[in-house]
């Protein structure tokens, strides 16, 4: 099984990842995604080709800018609870998670050159990523997420990453399940416009609580699905700030409630978002994993990659 020390992004080498896969598939590629679930597209040739096209843009960005790349599988909704709502039983969900990593392997194997690539099994929350119906205990979250994480442990996944996490109990449960399966785990919290998690916890409180509950279990933390304006003034300081290594922000300044109700995509300004990322590198000493979330696509990540590469060259 891989360990944290095996992950090339732990060396400080800058990495990019993808943008908002679901919003891209819906608004730009014309797919219908019930319950915002992308993973069912793995069943069809057209769906798999769409994924190859989608990830291909980002792989090219990484290579052109001399950056590493984190291949996040399209499995944010591929857990048993969400799968049941889509008519998929536990065995089909396990097969979908396996198939997603096989596709990530194919994409990695098809790239030439020395760009380091990490395959991450992507995990989403058990409830709504904007309005959690309940705050799970660590043990309840561990029980919920174990099956998906064990499925990833049976594949070539190098790690798992839980994104759009709204409260510390669920984060801790994911980490404990990943530790039991022998996989490194990253946790990405989302914030409201005040920089706090939907649970009301500050980022500092959330990181310190999860570290305490799991013995410092996450290999690192990230922030996702919020605009930098929402959280840049609420970042932790000192050692806690150093635990944050990645950002997958929205380009839109809309709140979660506004995004939920939006009928058109708000893509914001890719160049402005890139400059926001450069400023964030001055606030977070270990920040070196950069991607996007809702409403962002390869154009945003391309701007971010160029800005970060230029910043590193000037340093």
Image (tube, rainbow, N blue to C red):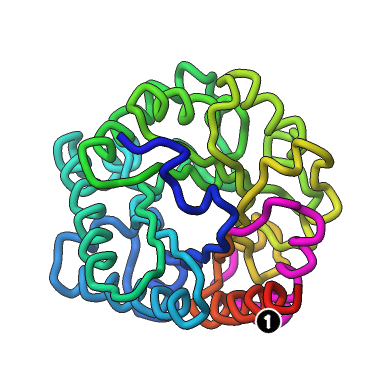
Q: Which residues are magenta?
A: 261-288
What percent of the width, then of the height, locates residue 126? 44, 36
Whether residue 128 sits left or right of residue 72 in the image: it is right
What percent of the width, then of the height, locates residue 160? 40, 42
For the point 28% across and 56% down, the residue is 39
Does the magenta portion include 286? yes
Does the magenta portion include 283? yes
For the point 68% across and 78% down, the residue is 313
* Residue 260 seen: no
Residue located beneath label 1 in the image: 269
What percent of the width, then of the height, locates residue 93? 22, 42
What percent of the width, then of the height, locates residue 279? 79, 67
Q: Is residue 124 above or below residue 107?
A: above
Asked which secondary structure carries label 1, the reply is loop
Whether residue 260 sits left or right of residue 157 in the image: it is right
Whether residue 164 sits left or right of residue 197 in the image: it is left
Label 1 environment density (alpha carbons within 10 Å; few <14, some 14–19, many ≥20): some
| Quarter of the image where the C terminus is located | bottom right
Q: Is residue 2 above or below residue 210?
A: below
């Amino acid at each position: 099984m891989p360990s944290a020390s095996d992950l090339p992004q732990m060396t400080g080498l800058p990495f990019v990842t993808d943008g908002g896969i679901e919003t891209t598939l819906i608004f730009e590629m014309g797919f219908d995604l019930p319950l915002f679930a992308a993973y069912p597209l793995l069943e069809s040739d057209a769906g798999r080709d769409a994924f190859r096209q989608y990830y291909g843009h980002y792989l090219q960005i990484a290579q052109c800018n001399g950056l590493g790349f984190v291949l996040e599988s399209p499995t944010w909704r591929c857990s048993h609870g969400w799968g049941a709502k889509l008519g998929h039983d536990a065995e089909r969900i396990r097969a979908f998670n396996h198939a997603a990593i096989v596709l990530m392997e194919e994409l990695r194997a098809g790239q030439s050159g020395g760009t380091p690539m990490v395959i991450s099994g992507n995990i989403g929350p058990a409830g709504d990523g904007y309005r959690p119906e309940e705050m799970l205990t660590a043990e309840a979250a561990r029980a919920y997420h174990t099956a998906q994480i064990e499925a990833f442990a049976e594949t070539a996944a190098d790690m798992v990453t839980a994104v759009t996490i709204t409260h510390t109990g669920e984060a801790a449960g994911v980490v404990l399940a990943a530790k039991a399966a022998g996989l490194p785990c990253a946790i990405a919290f989302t914030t409201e416009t005040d920089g706090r998690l939907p649970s009301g916890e500050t980022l500092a409180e959330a990181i310190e609580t999860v570290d305490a509950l799991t013995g410092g279990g996450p290999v690192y933390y990230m922030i996702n699905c919020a605009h930098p304006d929402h959280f840049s003034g609420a970042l932790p300081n000192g050692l806690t700030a150093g635990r944050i290594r990645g950002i997958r922000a929205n380009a839109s300044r809309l709140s979660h409630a506004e995004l939920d109700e939006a009928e058109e995509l708000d893509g914001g300004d890719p160049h402005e978002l890139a400059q926001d990322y450069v400023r964030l590198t001055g606030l977070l000493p270990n920040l070196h994993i950069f991607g996007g979330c809702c409403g962002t696509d390869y154009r945003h990540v391309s701007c971010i990659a160029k800005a970060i590469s230029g910043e590193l060259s000037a340093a």
